[in-house]
Amino acid sequence: MLGVPGNLLFSSPDGNLIVLKLAELRPGMENISLRVRIVRLEEVREITTSYGFTHRILDGEVEDETRKMELTVWNERIESFNEVKLGDELILDNCFITSFKGVLSVNVGRESDARIDA
């Protein structure tokens, strides 16, 4: 599926496959699949949005050979990280990239999938 460890794959609007590294990601990118290594995982916490919605999130950090990047796992996808340990390589499918206070983050949301790369 993913040819080279650490590469990111996503489809352009015309359906062509594009390969990226973490260093090439930009805010607003969506539907990204990637292979990364887990560097840090924190305790699950709750946040309340400015609209009053409460969410559970798991923060962490991932890396490839080009850089490290923040990781945010949302709500029901947190369970897919129950067996994940530091140093594990993961395949993350259908992720999106955000920027909060100038810091880029790979987001694993309701439509995303996460699995250990065996």
Image (tube, rainbow, N blue to C red):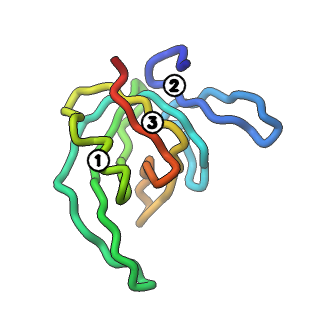
User: Residue 20, located in which quarter of the rendered image?
Assistant: top right
Q: Which label belongs to residue 89?
A: none
- How far apart are labels 1 and 3 at the CA level? 14 Å
SS at mark 3 in the image: strand
Q: Position of residue 82 (x, y in %)?
A: 22, 41
Q: Residue placed at 44% from the left, 61% from the top?
A: 102
2 or 1: mark nearer the eye: 1
* Amino acid type, residue under disc 1 in the picture: Glu
- Pick whichever of labels 2 and 1 is earlier in the sequence: 2
Name the amino acid, label 2. Asn
The image position of residue 74, as x and y in percent, is 37, 57
The quarter in which the C terminus is drawn is top left
Kindly identify which residue carries mark 3: 92
Give the foreground label among 1 and 3.
Answer: 1
Residues under labels 2 and 3: Cα distance? 11 Å
Amino acid under disc 3: Leu
Badge 2 local density, few (<14 within 10 Å), some, or many (20+)? some
In the displayed structure, 1 sits above or below 20; it is above
The crowd level at tag 3 (other Cα within 10 Å; few <14, some 14-19, many 20+) is many
